[in-house]
Image: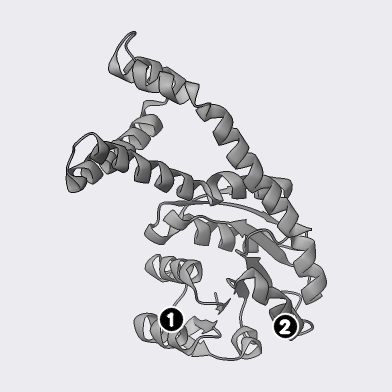
Amino acid sequence: MKIAFIGGGVMGEAMLSAILDKRLSTPEAISVSDIKESRRQHLGQRYGVEVVESNRLAVEKSDLVVLAIKPQDLTGVMAELNGQLKSSQLVLSIIAGTRINTFCRGLNHGCVVRVMPNTPAQIGQGISVWTATADVTEQQKGWVSSILGAMGKEIYVDDEQYIDMATAVSGSGPAYIFLFVEHLVDAAVHIGLPRDMAQELVLQTVLGSGQFLQKSGKPPDELRRMVTSPGGTTAEALAQFERGRFSELVIQAVSAAYNKARELGE
C-alpha cells in the first residue's frame, strides 16, 4: 500500500510510526509533505520515508492520502489537490470538525474517510471513531481498520453525526483526564504530600482504576459504590463533588465541545 501524508505533525507522525511498526507499509512506499522544512527533515531522517515540499507530488502515486493538516490550512490544500486525485485513491482525514461533504466538494472526490483519533494513539493506546462515503470499497475499509487498529482501538459508524459526538468525548477526553490529574496532584500537595510522590500516587491511581474498570466488566457506578463506605473518607470527598455539581459541569463541558465541533463543520 502506497501512502501519502499531507502534513507531518504530531498525529500524522503517530499514524506514520504505527503503520511502519505494524509493517502495514514500507518507508519506500510512503511520502510526506509538510510546509515546515524542519518537519520534513525530521521525518525523513527518523523513518526513512520520502519527504517532499509539493502536495501534488506526494499524492501522485499513492493508494491512500492522509490529510493531517491544521484546519486553517485545509482550503489551500484542497484547492491545490482539486482534480489531481484518481477516483480510486482513498482520502483519509484526521482533521477535527471538518465534515465529509466539505472534502468531497473541495477535492471534487468521492472516496473519503473521516476519522476522529485521540492523542493516546501516539503510544498505541488511542481510540478512533471513523466513517466512510459509499465510494469507499471493502478493501479500503480494511486498510483503514488496520491502520487505526495499529494505534489502539477503532470504531466504525455509519452516521457521521457520531464523529462530532466522539470528538467531544474521546477526542477532547484526554484533556479532561489531564486536567483532573493536574488538580488532584495539586490537591495532594496542598494537604502536604511532596509533589513527586503526589504525581506517582495520582498517575498510578488513574492507570490502575482505568484498567480495573475495563477488566472487571462492572459499570463505574457499581465500582464507585464498592469503594465508598458510608460515613467514610471517600463518601466525604464525593459529597463535596456533588455539592460542586460535578456531574452537571461534566455534561456542560462535553456539550460545549460537541456544539463547537458542529460549529466548526458548518
Density class for disc 2 (Cα within 10 Å; few <14, some 14-19, many ≥20) is some
* Quarter placement of the N terminus: bottom right
Residue 162 against residue 75 in the figure, above or below: above
Horizontal placement of 114 versus 49: left or right?
right
Q: Is residue 110 visible?
A: no
First in sequence: mark 1 vs mark 2? 1
Outermost residue, top side: 230
Residue 47 against residue 12 in the figure, above or below: below
Where does residue 137 sit, x and y in percent of width and height?
70, 62
Alpha carbon of mark 1 to alpha carbon of mark 2: how far?
A: 23 Å
Residue with the mark numbered 1: 27
Q: Residue at x 51, y 86 (%)?
A: 36
User: Which secondary structure lies at badge 2?
Assistant: helix
Horizontal placement of 116 versus 15: left or right?
right
- The kind of residue tagged 1 is Pro
Q: Residue at x 71, y 81 (%)?
A: 76
Where does residue 172 sit, x and y in percent of width and height?
54, 50
Residue 165 against residue 250 in the figure, above or below: below
Residue with the mark numbered 2: 81
